Amino acid sequence: MARVEPQFKQLTHSYGFDDVAIVPGDVTLNPDQTNIFFQLSSLTFTIPIVAAAMDAVVDPAFAVHFSRMGGMAVLNLEGVQSRYQNTEEVVRGIVQAPVSDVTGVLQKVYSEPIKESLVGERVRHIKEGGGICAVSMTPSNTKRLSAVAAEAGADVVVVQATVTTARHISKSYNGLVFSELRHSLPLNIPIVVGNCVTYRTALELMRNGIDAVMVGVGPGAACTTREVLGVGVPQVTATIECTAAREVYFKETGRYVALITDGGIRNGGDLCKAMACGADAVMLGSTLARTQEAPGQGYHWGMANPHPALPRGTRIKVGTTGSLEQVLFGPTVVTDGTQNLVGALKTAMGMCGAFTIRDMQKVDMVIAPSIKTEGKAYQLSGAR
């Protein structure tokens, strides 16, 4: 009889967007019959796309413009907008810094203290422009900055860190308790919390009364968390795990908590797969940093760059490929799926017979790592 050796750990396989494909439905429908609204508590957005809380993506002007397009843009309250009055000059310094110096430049820029007066000023700027104002902060600054933002008229509070849990142990400050945060803010202000990638963490966050969970650790184009720390779960598996928690919680309470898949979405195909995995919306960073309206001028950098001893982001050149309207609604001038994202989603939903995002979450998927290369010899060889 063969001896069975004990195992220390049992690993499971995890999947990213390139590993899977969506199975078309038995019934199809016209794309213009689909409903892609994104509901966040009492707020309704006509497109399920959230602009990432990064200084190269969202400033007050971009937030107003993005609101008019039907989506939600999140302003980073720990970025240049809350530290400097002359933000355009500061961003220009980051963009123009030599590659060898950019990490040091970022660390210096983000060492400037956050000014509460600027937090209120930026929120009022967005509200006066007619935009929905969503603001982001890390757990350690949430109690202070959320109160200032709410007082100025913010509509949504996003508590965001590389990894977020409902239980945090620290000697340096009194931990943030999300159930207490819910009671401290007006009930009409939705609370979005992230990022997480597991069933247990997502379920515990939901049970603390939050309104949406952000899914994703380390997949962003400008994030190096996976390289520096080795931490993360591919987005397909992460989204499915958190979706399972959402469905259990919904059955327990009758309260629906939205899921926002954050990071790693490069094109329309990835966006559609995120929805098929259970997401209600997606958060985009580098894709929107490529728009003409983005403040980063064709560059993009992560939120974890400024760490004084262990920076975990990098400035990348993404270029400027078109307007925000082109990226969201077309007409597209490229064939890589990075423009007309809304059209891609509605078309995929039509192919699957999905009238709503909720329907799209229930479509079949298959493991198909060769889906992008099957039959594409001429495309791969560059012959056009």
Image (cartoon, rainbow, N blue to C red):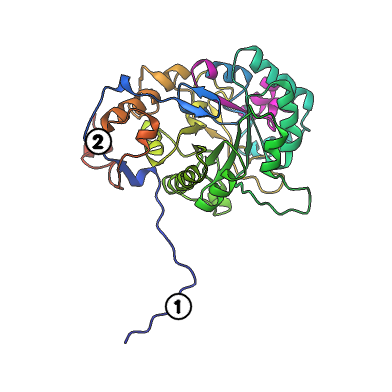
- Label 1 sits on a secondary structure element that is loop
For this view, does 67 lie left or right of residue 338? right
Q: Provide the residue span drawn in magenta.
A: 67-95
Q: Residue furthest bottom?
A: 1
Q: What amino acid type is highlighted by mark number 1?
A: Pro
Q: x, y percentage for residue 138? A: 67, 39
Q: Nearer the viewer, mark 2 or mark 1?
A: 2
Residue 175's label in the rendered image is none
Above or below, 253 relative to 198 = above
Q: Check disc 1 and report the residue beneath it.
A: 6
- Label 2 sits on a secondary structure element that is loop
Total labels drawn = 2
> Could you tell me if residue 241 is visible in this image?
yes
Q: Which residue is nearer to you in this view: 264 or 376? A: 264
Residue 69 falls inside the magenta stretch: yes
Q: x, y percentage for residue 124? A: 70, 17
Q: Check disc 2 and report the residue beneath it.
A: 25
Q: What amino acid type is highlighted by mark number 2?
A: Gly
For this view, does 24 lie left or right of residue 19? left
Above or below, 291 relative to 142 = above
Estimate how packed mark 1 is, as few (under 14), some (14 to 19) or many (20 or more) residues with alpha carbons within 10 Å. Answer: few
Q: Quadrant of residue 82?
A: top right
**Going 78% across and 48% down the picture, which residue do you hit?**
173
